[in-house]
Image (tube, rainbow, N blue to C red):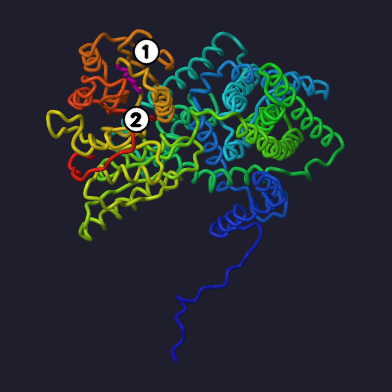
Amino acid sequence: SSPVPSAVIVAAPRIALPLADPVLIVAVAMLVFLVVPLLFERLRLPGIVGLIVTGAAIGPHGFGIMERDQTIVLLGTVGLLYLMLLIGLELDLDEFRRYRNRSLVFGALTFLVPGAAGTALATALGYSLASALLIGAVFASHTLLAYPIASRLGILRNPAVTATLGGTLLAEVLALLLLAVVVESRGSGLGPAFWAGLAVPFAIYVAAVLLLLPRLARWFFRTVAHQGASAFAFVMAALFTVSWLAHFGRVEPIIGALLCGLALNRLIPEHGPLMSRIHFAGHALFIPFFLLSVGMLVDVRALDTARAWTVAVALALGVVVSKGAAAVLSGRVFRWSGDEAWVVFGLSVPHAAGTLAIVLVGFDVGLLDQAEVNSVVLLILATCVVGPWVVERHGRRVALAEEARPYDPSSAPWRVLVPVSNPATADALLDLAMIVRGRGSHEPLRPLMVVRGEAPEAELAEAERMLGHAVAHAAGAEVPAEPLTRVDPNFAAGIARGAAETRSTALVIGWDGRRSGSQAIFGTVLDQLLELTRQLVMVCRITAPINTTRRVVMVVPPGSDRHPGYQEAARLVHAVAAGVGASLATVAMEPGAGREAAGERIGVEGWQGLVAWLDANVRADDLVVVVSARRETVAWHPRLERVPAALAALGRASFIALYPREDGAAEPVLEDGGGPERVA
């Protein structure tokens, strides 16, 4: 036999510590991300704590398995920016606006109380005023390290948590501003030129991000892509570009990442596939690398003197006590429960990103030495362990307390049926249906396909293909879907039977904008469907991605607010506006109608006045919702039937004709006939 060519002989790998092979480094990191959280959760400790402790153990100051080299630093930085992006994206801006005073008060307290305590403690330990102010800035800063735990527990919309998320931005900006003031005061002083040079670039930067980025994103999602890899790549490009430009605004990149999330907040629906992809990439990869890199900073052996240990322990205790005091004071002011105050403390006590930035700058300019750096790193480890543990423990109690609150009909999960037949509009209908389904609902979406009786195999195969696409689209947003196929000679009857059999409470169906006959509202199928159902029905003509909506216009015709199902319909319109992050305007045709709705209220006179207002004021990025009524019901009016055609003729904005639920309707009598020609 011939010898094996030397070119195919692969030498056995040599493993030396610290690891140098990038493939092996990533393999070890992935094993850590897989095993450690599961192990710590079995020990009833947060997985976040496990990643930090493991980073300390395998890092350069532990067993030396991995170096904190440029790769780890890069991935850790990406994870930190990603974490700040998620905070901005998931912050409920409507709740934040509602509780903005609480956010401002908490932000001021969690900056002033720890800042003053840190400065006083450092002065007592013999530090100069400048160094003491830097340590005060360290105390005042914090990182929302336990944010993923609060997100997993579903308490992000709790008023105390919302105030914490909003107050974090204020506290972090003030801490970094204090850093800049201390450093600059050593040079040119604190004259008018200094304050102008600090405030003007920051104001320009914030204005540019919050004004220009949403416009660019809306154009991109409307004209290029609103889902898929391109949309995810756009978000990543925006994140790192805005974060890098933060240097021109004289702030740290983490502030830029948070602003990027706030700017894109209303354009990325919480229950959409894009948000699901962002969550997956962050929680599975980037954020764990950040936690691992934080743990690698810990060097307990550097604390080799009694004074070093004294300083480290004093700083750690000082941060815990002062952040706890700020949380308790805020809880007393706003009457938060004990568990809510503990959650606020757990969210605001971890120190990582801003703390590291302050300490490293102080070290570079000579205000802090290596002993203080090591003490602060130990402080980071201690607070990063305490914070997540507190949030895990008390956040569960907050979540249980919210579940035990009295039943609120506006938050009830709905069973949503989505009849589909047109591949071009199916995704838009599903995106809207996911918003209608509601947050936290365990009910699956039910996409439905109706084919004629004795349909050939080709039609059944096409139905299965479309339903498979619908299920995949919903799965991309982590929303369960239960596909349904009905064989029926009458399409409207098939949809009505599907709604009855699944006990659906809402139907979301598309319309192509054309009517079949002068007496029809929409067309044969949709008109019959309205007669055969008593559930809430949303007839939709979506002309642009739903996430690009800037304003929802709710039209309240005469008598609509006296319909028994009006309040439920109005709550649904509010939920849609909140789900797409749009403002809400109510157009009322009667004095006093629609006053329960939030946002702008506009009065018009008569049907001609309504059409004229819509023609003059509706924009391409609006979503018009007409609260309509079925024929012969208390709120029905013959002119209602002309409104959908008038809106379709405008051809600018998306619109929904919303037919409230009819509790007193008789059971439907299904007849054959109809066809698929007008269902979008």
Main secondary-structure element of the magenta-colored stretch: strand
Position in image of residue 286 (x %, y %): 53, 45
Position in image of residue 586 (x %, y %): 36, 16
Measured Cα–Cα span from mark 2 to mark 1: 28 Å
Q: Nearer the viewer, residue 230 or 603?
A: 603
135 to 600, vertically: above or below: below
Quadrant of the rendered image containing residue 377: top right
Looking at the rendering, the stretch of residues picked out in magenta corresponds to: 552-557
326 displayed left or right of 239: right
Quarter of the picture containing the N terminus is bottom left
Residue assigned mark 1: 593
Tell me the residue at 63%/65% (across/down). 15
Q: Amino acid at mark 2?
A: Thr
Q: Secondary structure at mark 1?
A: loop
The extreme left residue here reads: 518
Q: Amino acid at mark 1?
A: Ala
Mark 2 and mark 1 lie on one chain; the one further toward the N terminus is: 2
263 to 419, vertically: above or below: above
Quadrant of the rendered image containing residue 372: top right
